Image: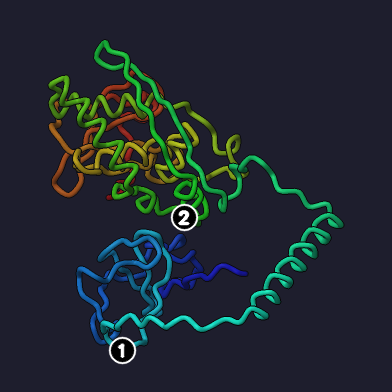
Amino acid sequence: MAEKLLKCPSCGNSNPIGTQFCYSCRSKLFEYDQPNSNQYPGYSPTNFACPHCHAERIWRMDQYKHYYCGQCKRYIQPYTQQPYTQQPIIVQPPKATSVSAIVAGIVIFIVAIILIYAVASSLNVSIPDDQDDNEATQLGTFYRDYSWDYGGYPWSWDLNIPKQSYYEYEGRYRTLNFEYYVTENDPYIISLANGLADAARSKGYGSYETVSFVMAFVQSLPYTSDSVTTSYDEYPRYPVETLVDNGGDCEDTSILFAALLEAYPLGYDAVLFLIPWDSPNHMAVGVWGSSNLGAYVEHDGREYNYCETTGDGFKIGEIPQEYEGISVQVIEV
């Protein structure tokens, strides 16, 4: 099935569904809006969640006035039924069953089993004993162990992520609007952020050391090229994908770092940096804070300190020499 595209009202360029700005002219493609009770009977701010990912109050409207979820980018079908009403549960009394009907049912069941076995044998169909990780329909869990050093201490963390969650992210389309990948509300990102925050508190770390601690964790993930780990040259990953894949390139680790900083209970103000501005080939993260930490970028009256997520040893405000003094694109997340 062909992918549905949004046509830019300014230049006519076709863009993937969920794209915020036109790839060609960067014009805005949709507007933020909320459904109302006339369009969606039974709507209220508390009970109107996305039926796909259950995100609440993250609604967007495309140029055709169709709503879709800002979290999972799937379209929401308008409700056509009457407002919600409570319906009683009706319990039907059991019907009397004759002995002949029971015998006939048993015979039919046995015959069906024999036919299924015969067909399966003729087709040489076998049922695998082990679950295949590459099939999204198989249930199971990914187990990942991470280890890194910070502050003179060795650290380790175990994370269990259901395969269903990983495959759901893997099945989403890829867009160059990188803010969509920063899923700070994902429960596994929140769980990891909470564990990192607890560990930082146990050592009495302040804000600077906490951010540095989280950055050291992200920097410890192996750098892997998209062309090596996937069949695509440019394949931005969602944070859960980067954790399961145990690494990624600069945009993957930057997106993961920004999501962790934004997630509860850390809650830092982070942005993404695309470098250089005119022809980006690198990504980093900016964290709002004091400007006396080194390199920073001013944006909307705030100073965001440069954070490099690839390679060990980079501190807040330290920037690779080749990127010093150049202009960057700032992406709010």
- Front in this rendered view, residue 70 or 329: 70
Picture coordinates of residue 255 (x, y %)? 37, 41
Q: As shown in the figure, which amino acid type bears the numbered disc 1? A: Gln
Q: Residue at x 21, y 31 (%)?
A: 197
Instruction: Give whichever of discs 1 and 2 has the lower sequence position.
Output: 1
What colouring method underlies this structural image? rainbow
Q: Residue furthest right?
A: 122
Q: Residue at x 32, y 47 (%)?
A: 187
Q: CA distance from mark 1 to mark 2?
A: 37 Å
Q: As shown in the figure, which amino acid type bears the numbered disc 2? A: Thr
Pointer 2 local density, CA inside 10 Å: few below 14, some 14–19, many at least 20: some
Q: Residue furthest top?
A: 152
Q: Residue at x 62, y 69 (%)?
A: 1
Horizontal side, residue 190 vs residue 5: left or right? left
Picture coordinates of residue 307 (x, y %)? 29, 31
Picture coordinates of residue 62 (x, y %)? 38, 73
SS type, badge 1: loop
SS type, badge 2: loop
Picture coordinates of residue 111 (x, y %)? 77, 68
Horizontal side, residue 292 vs residue 24: left or right? left
Pointer 1 local density, CA inside 10 Å: few below 14, some 14–19, many at least 20: few
Q: Nearer the viewer, mark 1 or mark 2?
A: 1
Residue under label 1, please give it.
82
Q: Residue at x 39, y 27 (%)?
A: 322
Horizontal side, residue 60 vs residue 244: left or right? left
Horizontal side, residue 19 vs residue 201: left or right? right
Looking at the picture, does residue 60 appear above or below residue 225? below
Residue under label 2, please give it.
175
Which quadrant of the view contains residue 260?
A: top left
Looking at the picture, does residue 113 appear above or below residue 282? below
- Front in this rendered view, residue 128 or 329: 128
Q: Are marks 1 and 2 in contact (CB under 8 Å)?
A: no
